Structure formats: C-alpha cells, structure tokens
Amino acid sequence: MMRRVSTAAAAAALMLAAGHASPAKALDTVIGGMASACSKDAKAGNGTIEAINNCTDALVAETMTSRDRAATMVNRGTLYLTRSEWLLAIKDFDNALLLQPHMGEAFVNRGAALIGMQRYAEGEQQIDQGLTLNPELPERAYYNRAIARWRQDDVRGAYFDFQKALELKPGWAEPTQQLAYFTVTRR
C-alpha cells in the first residue's frame, strides 16, 4: 500500500511537479544548418526566442526529408515547452505527427504540454500512446505520466511510474526527489 507521507509533503511535491513536465527528447536531425542549430538548442533546453527562430527559419528555408521536418517541429515544440507556451508546442507536435504518425516523442511531448495545461487525463493518454511507439527516452515519458497520475490521485500508478523512470535512468534526481514523498507499506 502506498500513501503520501503528509499533506504538506504531497503539496510540496505536486508544486515541484506541476508545470514541470519534462520533454521526452529533442530529436536529432541528419542535416546541417539551422535545423542542426535547432536540434542543439532543443537538447540544451535553450528556449530563447533566437533558438525558436532558428527552428522556424530551418522549417521555412531548408529542404529536408519528412522525418527531418517532423523532428525539427518536435525540437521547436520542446523549446516552446521550456517557455510554458503549451498551445504553440502542441501545434508543433500535431504538425510533426501529420508528417510522421508513429513518432513517439511527438506524442510524449504533446502529453507533457497537456500536463502543463492541467489536462492530466489527456496528457496521460498521449504519453501512453507515445510509449507504445518506443520513444528514445522512455524515462521521460514515465516521469511525466507519473505527474499526470499523481495529479489525478492515482498515487499507486504515480509511484510505479516514478520507479520505472528511475530504473531506466539510475541516479536521475527528479524521480528520486518525488519518490521521497512516498511511504510504502505492505498489508
């Protein structure tokens, strides 16, 4: 049986988790130029206007494959996520999915944006769909789904997802911190 240690601790954990969904992954591109700069900025979490403009310029000016265009959209979307610009992020993830309907990162990141908008059930559903498509960093998906589950009072589901995130990326601070708010007892 899992339970929260205390209401105050749970509230503190939720405040830490709320709005701090983690992008699944910034995707690599196989081309140079502005799309490459966009990818580097997304991986670094550099959500500046200049970084977003690099991505936009790449999408407008560079010739790229459908996969690279979708990856660049996901990268720009992750930059919007770092700025809490949820609707712009979702638009990029939706457009990426129009080009590459089986891109797990787009679903997982779309879920993160929905969590940021406090649409937890929808976010969880998107992450579930992304997980079926084997995203490159599944630990991010489990972490975000844990946040969504916790906010929906699915404490047990949240606990196991935080555990899974930590199992997939040992030593990761965020799930370790969240797990500290749980006490596990056996009945």
Image (tube, rainbow, N blue to C red):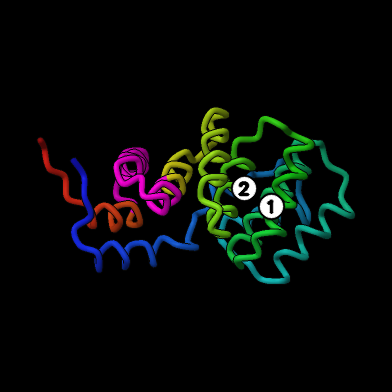
Residue at the image point whose x is 58% and y is 64% from the top: 82
Secondary structure at badge 1 equals helix
View extreme (bottom): residue: 49
Tag 1: residue type?
Ile
Give the residue at mark 1: 90
Provide residue 144's location: percent of width, then percent of height: 46, 49
Provide residue 104's location: percent of width, then percent of height: 60, 36
Identify the magenta region: 146-172
**Position of 138 relative to 14 (above/below):** above
Q: In the rendered view, does 105 fall on the left or right side of 177?
A: right
Q: In the rendered view, does 102 fall on the left or right side of 151?
A: right
Residue at the image point whose x is 59% and y is 54% from the top: 113
Give the residue at mark 2: 110
User: Magenta segment, principal secondary structure?
Assistant: helix
Mark 1 and mark 2 in contact? Answer it, CB < 8 Å.
Answer: yes
- Which class describes the residues within 10 Å of circle 1: few (<14), some (14-19), or many (20+)? many
Provide residue 2's location: percent of width, then percent of height: 21, 44
Residue at the image point whose x is 57% and y is 55% from the top: 43
Q: Earlier in the sequence, mark 1 or mark 2?
A: 1
View extreme (left): residue: 187
**Position of 135 relative to 49 (above/below):** above
**Position of 170 relative to 39 (above/below):** above
Which quarter of the figure is the N terminus placed in? top left
> Can see residue 41?
no
Tag 2: residue type?
Arg
Provide residue 95's location: percent of width, then percent of height: 77, 45
Q: Quadrant of residue 41?
A: bottom right
Q: In the rendered view, does 117 fall on the left or right side of 5?
A: right
Task: Confirm whether the magenta stretch covers residue 164.
Answer: yes
